[in-house]
Amino acid sequence: MSKFTKYLSSAILLAVFSFGLLADSFAQGKIVARLNFNPKVNGFNFKNYKNLEKEKKVWENDIVIDDLIRMFGIRASCKNGDAKNCIPKADARTWMAKQLKAMNIGHCEGIGVASLRFYQGIPFKNRRSPTQFQPNASVPFNLSLEQQLRNYISYYWITQTFDEVSEPTVATARLGPRSRSCSVGGGRASRRSGS
């Protein structure tokens, strides 16, 4: 598992666990963890969006071969093994098109991951701050949905389809909120339930 995949899996699991902890704590009136994320500053000012076929010219380049090289490497993505002059393999082009079409359900995972990465100051393609995407955007909420941001969001939408991300997420979701909070909070519910 790559360092990136481990980080992304950990971030998603931490967010899920934190929600479980907070839900349990709110029921008891005690806050045990807080992320000072303000949606009106750290979030985006646009709604979730879909890749509709009639708007294909807008989204067809939201993921490009450079993204596949970052995800899977040159050998898996390029016929000629040359990143600068990559001739994409047919299956790489097909996979990329399939992922873009799958985004017709929306981009919520990518939006969430991109906004959290901005909040934490984690770079994407050497851009760390909103001003590096759009000069007049001092915070993510000021960003317009333009190509570089669409690429960022789409890139992280795709990562949720990787087994290294989806399998722990599904397993955690099956536990339910009380069990999730206990797995982070020291197993309080298992003691309460007697197991």
Image (spheres, rainbow, N blue to C red):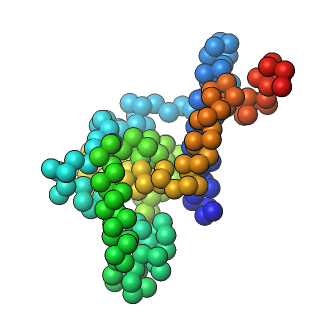
In this view, the residue in front, 6 or 166, is 166
* Residue 60 in picture, x, y percent from top left: 24, 59
Image point 38% across, 71% down: which residue?
A: 92
* Residue 100 in picture, x, y percent from top left: 32, 56
Question: How many numbered discs, if any?
Answer: 0
Q: Quarter-wise, where is residue 190 in the image?
A: top right
Q: Reply above or below: 168 against 62.
A: above
Q: Is residue 118 visible?
A: no
Image point 33% across, 49% down: which residue?
A: 103
Q: Is residue 187 visible?
A: yes
Q: Quarter-wise, where is residue 58 in the image?
A: bottom left
In this view, the residue in front, 131 or 3, is 3
Q: Reply above or below: 24 against 165.
A: above
Image point 24% across, 55% down: which residue?
A: 59
Image position of 194 (left or right of 109): right
In this view, the residue in front, 167 or 46, is 167
Image position of 5 (left or right of 189): left
Image point 69% across, 28% down: which residue?
A: 179
